[in-house]
Amino acid sequence: QKEVEQDPGPLSVPEGAIVSLNCTYSNSAFQYFMWYRQYSRKGPELLMYTYSSGNKEDGRFTAQVDKSSKYISLFIRDSQPSDSATYLCATGGYQKVTFGTGTKLQVIP
Amino acid sequence: DVKVTQSSRYLVKRTGEKVFLECVQDMDHENMFWYRQDPGLGLRLIYFSYDVKMKEKGDIPEGYSVSREKKERFSLILESASTNQTSMYLCASRGPGTGRTYGYTFGSGTRLTVV
């Protein structure tokens, strides 16, 4: 079983839609949870960071962690064409994290 | 903002060549990482380092080595390049603590093709 599972998509939505991206993980000891956004031919950039469980909101983005079900989510409200990218979840302990394979999102104008 | 700079965006090397990929970060971070990224496989950790002259194997270290002689520089070495090492290579740096600085900062990547 992979440590982190993520649906690769692709996911295509109309502009203005609410987007839900999800990952599951296997190790209940994981404490660090992150979402990265990666544009084509670029390195990933940190989008959201959460330590332990709960929700975190930043503008149109909300990250949720449910440690009881080992489920992490990223919600994007009022999605824009500029949100078209690959989104990677990441989780782990202090020493290193494991990344999901990424979900490719396309927001259609 | 932390900047992580990878020396080459694109490289083409021949099978059997020794290849050096260089990475420099400008925020005095102790933690540095090398990943490769392949379609369907995501990011896989090759090596990481928590201090100068210190290195730890990641999940796929075979065929690679690393060097960290200075805090800001972390080099990945392909001892004898093979075609299955054709990939996107990403270097990352990480700050201390458990706050947002824990998040990795990545370079733009080096697309290596081995022919």
Image (cartoon, rainbow, N blue to C red):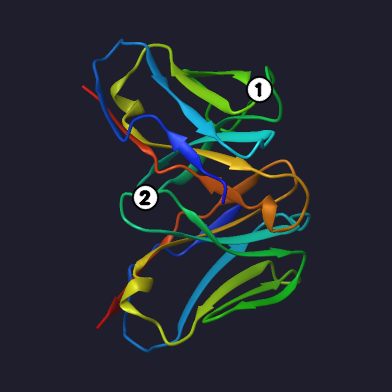
Residue A2 visible? no
Question: Disc 1 sits on a residue from what chain?
Answer: B
Can the viewer see residue B47 in this picture?
yes
Q: Is residue A94 left or right of residue B16?
A: right
Mark 1 crowdedness (10 Å alpha carbons): few <14, some 14-19, many ≥20: some
What's under tag 2, amino acid-wise? Lys
- Quarter of the image for the C terminus of chain A: give it: bottom left
Say which element carries label 2. Answer: loop
Describe residue B115's horizontal placement relative to residue A73 as left or right.
left
Q: Residue at x 21, y 22 (%)?
A: B115
Judge left or right: residue B57 versus residue A44. right
> Viewed as shown, does residue B21 lie left or right of A34?
left
Q: Are marks 1 and 2 on the same chain?
A: no
Q: Which residue is mark 1?
A: B55
- Mark 1 residue type: Lys
B4 or A14: nearer the viewer: B4
In this rendering, is residue A54 above or below B88?
A: below
Q: Residue furthest left?
A: B115
Asked if B93 appears above or below B49 in the picture, the reply is below
Q: Residue at x 42, y 12 (%)?
A: B79
The image's mark for residue A42 is: 2
Question: Can you give x and y, in whole percent of width and height, for residue A50 in the image?
Answer: 69, 65
Q: Chain of mark 2?
A: A
User: Can you say whether B109 is above or below B103 in the image?
Assistant: above
> Where residue A85 sits in the image (x, y, percent)?
36, 64
Q: Looking at the picture, tell me which residue is in the foreground, A64 or A40.
A: A40
Q: Nearer the viewer, mark 1 or mark 2?
A: 2
Q: Residue B72 falls in which quadrant of the image?
A: top right
Is disc 1 in contact with disc 2, using a CB cutoff of under 8 Å?
A: no
